[in-house]
Image: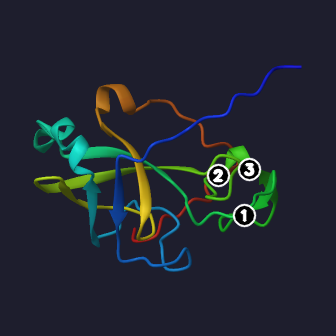
């Protein structure tokens, strides 16, 4: 049997959004026009050097309001049950969130972004630049989502 390792994650910041509970937050941030703020803690501010040159960034965060999970779930996009790891449900064994957002401005340690789906107070774990030549993929398959996905705001 393989040994399991525990992890210790250290937030680098906090997300400030208009969504105060999970029911208010969109299922996905894509297409959302609300402007949210991403506060990077002062001790990590230097790591934002040159971020203004990117139009989009990837935020990785902890779904701190997630409680429990099921390995088989029903999604808003289908009446059939699907495996948790074929969905984007926030209720997961390791509740990590990931969202590509539009970077509108930087004011010191505060990033103003559009297209976010996280609730207010969500711990920020990492930021990466979105690079189309690396992050975009061609000839993709959408599995069970093929023909079913309709994004909010689009």
Q: Which mark is residue 145?
A: 2
Q: Residue at x 65, y 46 (%)?
A: 94
Instruction: Indicate the quadrant where residue 54 lies.
Output: top left
Q: Secondary structure at mark 3?
A: helix
Say which residue label 1 marks: 78
The chosen color scheme is rainbow
Instruction: Indicate the quadrant where residue 138 lies.
Output: top left
Say which residue label 3 marks: 84
- Pointer 3 with pointer 1, Cβ within 8 A: no
Which mark is first along the chain, 3 or 2? 3
> How far apart are the alpha carbons under marks 2 and 1?
8 Å
Q: Position of residue 88 (x, y in %)?
A: 61, 53
Image quadrant occupied by the C terminus: bottom left
Q: Secondary structure at mark 2?
A: helix
Q: Position of residue 80 (x, y in %)?
A: 81, 61
128 or 27, which is in the foreground? 128
Which mark is first along the chain, 1 or 2? 1
Q: Residue at x 42, y 67 (%)?
A: 121
> How far apart are the alpha carbons under marks 3 and 1?
13 Å
Q: Residue furthest right?
A: 1
78 or 122, which is in the foreground? 122
């Amino acid at each position: 049997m393989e040994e399991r390792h525990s992890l210790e994650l250290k937030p680098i910041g906090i997300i400030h959004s208009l969504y105060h509970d999970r029911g208010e937050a969109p299922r996905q941030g894509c297409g959302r026009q609300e402007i949210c703020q991403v506060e990077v803690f002062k001790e990590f501010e230097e790591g934002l050097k040159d971020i203004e040159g990117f139009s989009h960034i990837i935020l990785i965060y902890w779904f701190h309001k997630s409680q429990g999970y099921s390995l088989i779930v029903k999604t808003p996009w289908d009446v059939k049950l699907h495996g948790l790891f074929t969905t984007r449900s926030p209720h997961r064994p390791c509740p990590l969130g990931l969202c590509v957002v539009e970077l509108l401005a930087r004011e010191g340690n505060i990033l103003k972004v559009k297209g976010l789906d996280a609730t207010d107070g969500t711990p920020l774990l990492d930021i990466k630049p979105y690079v189309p030549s690396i992050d975009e993929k061609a000839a993709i398959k959408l599995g069970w989502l093929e023909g079913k996905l309709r994004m909010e705001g689009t």
